[in-house]
Amino acid sequence: MLEEAAIQLSEASDELRHYHDRLDLDPNRLFELEQRISRQIALARKHQVMPEELPAVYQAMLEEQRLLDDSAGSLESLSQQVVEHHQLALETARQLHALRRGQRRRADPAYHRKYALTFDAARGLRD
Protein backbone atom coordinates (compact mmCIF):
# COMPACT_ATOMS: atom_id res chain seq x y z
CA MET A 1 0.00 0.00 0.00
CA LEU A 2 2.87 2.34 0.76
CA GLU A 3 4.52 1.40 -2.53
CA GLU A 4 1.26 2.06 -4.32
CA ALA A 5 1.01 5.55 -2.80
CA ALA A 6 4.64 6.23 -3.74
CA ILE A 7 3.93 5.22 -7.35
CA GLN A 8 0.84 7.47 -7.50
CA LEU A 9 2.83 10.31 -5.96
CA SER A 10 5.58 9.82 -8.53
CA GLU A 11 3.06 9.79 -11.39
CA ALA A 12 1.38 12.94 -10.08
CA SER A 13 4.76 14.61 -9.76
CA ASP A 14 5.63 13.65 -13.34
CA GLU A 15 2.29 15.00 -14.60
CA LEU A 16 2.83 18.29 -12.78
CA ARG A 17 6.33 18.56 -14.20
CA HIS A 18 5.00 17.96 -17.74
CA TYR A 19 2.21 20.49 -17.18
CA HIS A 20 4.72 23.03 -15.92
CA ASP A 21 6.94 22.47 -18.94
CA ARG A 22 3.99 22.99 -21.29
CA LEU A 23 2.82 26.05 -19.41
CA ASP A 24 4.30 29.09 -21.09
CA LEU A 25 4.42 31.89 -18.53
CA ASP A 26 4.90 35.10 -20.42
CA PRO A 27 5.68 37.88 -17.91
CA ASN A 28 4.34 40.56 -20.25
CA ARG A 29 1.07 38.70 -20.76
CA LEU A 30 0.79 38.14 -17.01
CA PHE A 31 1.32 41.88 -16.41
CA GLU A 32 -1.39 42.75 -18.97
CA LEU A 33 -3.85 40.38 -17.31
CA GLU A 34 -3.11 41.83 -13.88
CA GLN A 35 -3.71 45.33 -15.27
CA ARG A 36 -7.06 44.29 -16.77
CA ILE A 37 -8.15 42.72 -13.51
CA SER A 38 -7.11 45.86 -11.61
CA ARG A 39 -9.11 48.05 -14.02
CA GLN A 40 -12.17 45.86 -13.61
CA ILE A 41 -11.92 45.99 -9.83
CA ALA A 42 -11.51 49.78 -9.95
CA LEU A 43 -14.54 50.13 -12.24
CA ALA A 44 -16.58 47.88 -9.98
CA ARG A 45 -15.69 50.08 -7.01
CA LYS A 46 -16.49 53.23 -8.96
CA HIS A 47 -19.95 51.94 -9.88
CA GLN A 48 -20.45 50.23 -6.52
CA VAL A 49 -21.12 46.80 -8.01
CA MET A 50 -19.44 43.43 -8.01
CA PRO A 51 -16.97 42.88 -10.89
CA GLU A 52 -19.30 40.21 -12.31
CA GLU A 53 -22.03 42.86 -12.69
CA LEU A 54 -19.92 45.18 -14.87
CA PRO A 55 -21.30 43.87 -18.21
CA ALA A 56 -24.87 44.64 -17.08
CA VAL A 57 -23.79 48.11 -15.90
CA TYR A 58 -22.11 48.67 -19.27
CA GLN A 59 -25.29 47.70 -21.15
CA ALA A 60 -27.37 50.02 -18.95
CA MET A 61 -24.95 52.88 -19.66
CA LEU A 62 -25.15 52.21 -23.40
CA GLU A 63 -28.94 52.36 -23.22
CA GLU A 64 -28.79 55.61 -21.25
CA GLN A 65 -26.43 57.10 -23.83
CA ARG A 66 -28.79 56.06 -26.64
CA LEU A 67 -31.69 57.74 -24.86
CA LEU A 68 -29.65 60.91 -24.32
CA ASP A 69 -28.63 60.97 -27.98
CA ASP A 70 -32.28 60.55 -29.00
CA SER A 71 -33.35 63.32 -26.65
CA ALA A 72 -30.70 65.63 -28.09
CA GLY A 73 -32.39 65.25 -31.47
CA SER A 74 -35.74 65.86 -29.83
CA LEU A 75 -34.34 68.97 -28.14
CA GLU A 76 -33.27 70.38 -31.50
CA SER A 77 -36.70 69.62 -32.93
CA LEU A 78 -38.42 71.23 -29.95
CA SER A 79 -36.21 74.31 -30.23
CA GLN A 80 -37.20 74.66 -33.87
CA GLN A 81 -40.87 74.31 -32.94
CA VAL A 82 -40.49 77.03 -30.29
CA VAL A 83 -39.05 79.40 -32.89
CA GLU A 84 -41.85 78.60 -35.35
CA HIS A 85 -44.59 79.08 -32.73
CA HIS A 86 -42.99 82.32 -31.56
CA GLN A 87 -43.07 83.65 -35.13
CA LEU A 88 -46.69 82.54 -35.48
CA ALA A 89 -47.61 84.30 -32.21
CA LEU A 90 -45.90 87.52 -33.36
CA GLU A 91 -47.75 87.42 -36.69
CA THR A 92 -51.07 86.80 -34.93
CA ALA A 93 -50.38 89.72 -32.56
CA ARG A 94 -49.63 92.00 -35.53
CA GLN A 95 -52.89 91.00 -37.21
CA LEU A 96 -54.86 91.55 -34.01
CA HIS A 97 -53.23 94.96 -33.51
CA ALA A 98 -54.12 96.01 -37.06
CA LEU A 99 -57.68 94.75 -36.62
CA ARG A 100 -58.13 96.68 -33.37
CA ARG A 101 -56.66 99.83 -34.88
CA GLY A 102 -59.10 99.59 -37.79
CA GLN A 103 -62.06 99.04 -35.45
CA ARG A 104 -61.09 102.03 -33.35
CA ARG A 105 -60.99 104.30 -36.40
CA ARG A 106 -64.40 103.11 -37.59
CA ALA A 107 -66.05 103.48 -34.20
CA ASP A 108 -68.91 105.94 -33.72
CA PRO A 109 -67.67 109.46 -32.88
CA ALA A 110 -70.49 109.81 -30.32
CA TYR A 111 -69.09 106.79 -28.49
CA HIS A 112 -65.67 108.42 -28.42
CA ARG A 113 -67.12 111.65 -26.98
CA LYS A 114 -68.95 109.72 -24.26
CA TYR A 115 -65.87 107.68 -23.52
CA ALA A 116 -63.73 110.82 -23.34
CA LEU A 117 -66.27 112.47 -20.99
CA THR A 118 -66.19 109.46 -18.71
CA PHE A 119 -62.42 109.67 -18.49
CA ASP A 120 -62.58 113.42 -17.91
CA ALA A 121 -65.09 112.92 -15.10
CA ALA A 122 -62.91 110.23 -13.56
CA ARG A 123 -59.92 112.54 -13.68
CA GLY A 124 -61.93 115.28 -12.02
CA LEU A 125 -62.81 112.97 -9.14
CA ARG A 126 -59.18 112.10 -8.62
CA ASP A 127 -57.93 115.70 -8.69
Image (cartoon, helix red, strand yellow):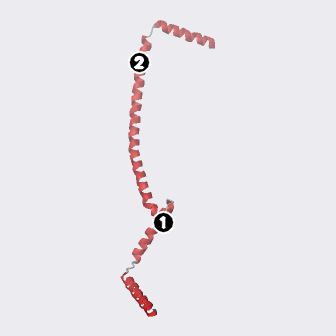
Q: Secondary structure at mark 2?
A: helix
Percent x, y of residue 117: 55, 8
**Quadrant of the image occupied by residue 108:** top left
Which residue lies most toward the left here?
Answer: 22
Question: Which mark is on residue 41?
Answer: 1
| Up-down relation of residue 24 to residue 76 (above or below) | below
Q: Amino acid at mark 2?
A: Leu
Front tag of 1 and 2: 1
Percent x, y of residue 122: 59, 12
Whether residue 74 is visible to the viewer of this picture, yes or no, is yes
Whether residue 127 is visible to the viewer of this picture, yes or no, is no
Q: How many marks?
A: 2
Instruction: Assign the N terminus to one quadrant of the image.
Output: bottom left
Asked whether the beta carbons under mark 1 and mark 2 sit within 8 Å of each other, the answer is no
**Horizontal placement of 73 versus 44: left or right?**
left
Distance from the alpha carbon under mark 1 to that under mark 2:
72 Å
Q: Amino acid at mark 1?
A: Ile
Residue indicated by mark 2 = 99
Kindly identify the residue that appears in the image at 44 percent across and 70 percent down: 35
Question: Which mark is on residue 124?
Answer: none
**Could you say which is closer to the camera, residue 110 or residue 31?**
31
Percent x, y of residue 98: 41, 19
Which residue lies most toward the top here?
Answer: 110
Percent x, y of residue 121: 59, 9
| Up-down relation of residue 122 to residue 11 (above or below) | above
